[in-house]
Amino acid sequence: MGIIYADLRLSNPSRPDLEEINAKAVVDTGALHLCIPEHVAVQLGLKIVEQREAKTADGKSHLVDYAGPIQIEVFGRHCLTGALILGDQVLLGAIPLEDMDIVVDPARRKITVNPASPNIALSLALGFKAHQD
């Protein structure tokens, strides 16, 4: 399939006084979280929430900082999440992709909005029973 990249805007909703960051991210549906380098966390003034154990593709486990909140924006869609402070490049994982209803187009090696919901992100809330008046 090859490597897929995406242009993102990252910001700290707790610090609107700080500039947003444009980032080119590796898209990895095998990863769950957003991963950012330490310098991005510093630039955004993110607060370290806790440490988490992260297993990397080489099978090794690492104790890393988990920081947030961080806002991701792509194609006019947003999500709020936390980020693992790990690596030297931004990595966009499956959880924020799902949250923004963004899909991977492997043939074109890009991401796009879900064609089934092109105007607004769709979220599934299966098992939730709506209140009937």
Image (cartoon, grey):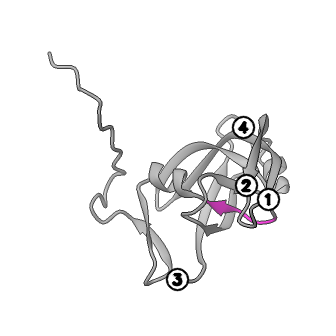
Marked residue nearer the N-terminal end (2 or 4): 4
Mark 1 / mark 3, whichever is N-terminal: 3
Q: Residue at x 64, y 53 (%)?
A: 34
Residue at mark 2: 55
Q: Which residues are magenta?
A: 88-92
User: Mark 3 sits on what residue?
Assistant: 1
Q: Position of residue 94 (x, y in %)?
A: 53, 56
Q: How much space separates mark 3 and mark 2, taking CA atoms?
A: 23 Å
Q: Is residue 50 above or below residue 20?
A: above
Disc 2, SS: strand
Crowdedness of circle 4 by 10 Å Cα count: few (<14), some, many (20+)? some
Q: Residue furthest top?
A: 133
Report how far apart the C-alphas of labels 2 and 1 lie in the structure. Answer: 6 Å
Which residue does the image show at 60% across and 79% down from the upper left?
3
Residue 87, above or below 65: below
* Amino acid type, residue under disc 2 in the picture: Lys
Q: Which residue is mark 1?
A: 60
User: How many tags in the picture?
Assistant: 4
How busy is the neighbourhood of tag 2: few (under 14 within 10 Å), some, or many (20 plus)? Answer: few
Q: Secondary structure at mark 1?
A: loop
Dot 3 falls on a residue whose secondary structure is: loop
Task: Select label 1 or label 3 by which is in front.
Answer: 1
* Camera-nearest label, 3 or 2: 2
Looking at the rendered structure, the secondary structure element under dot 4 is loop
Q: Which mark is residue 15?
A: 4
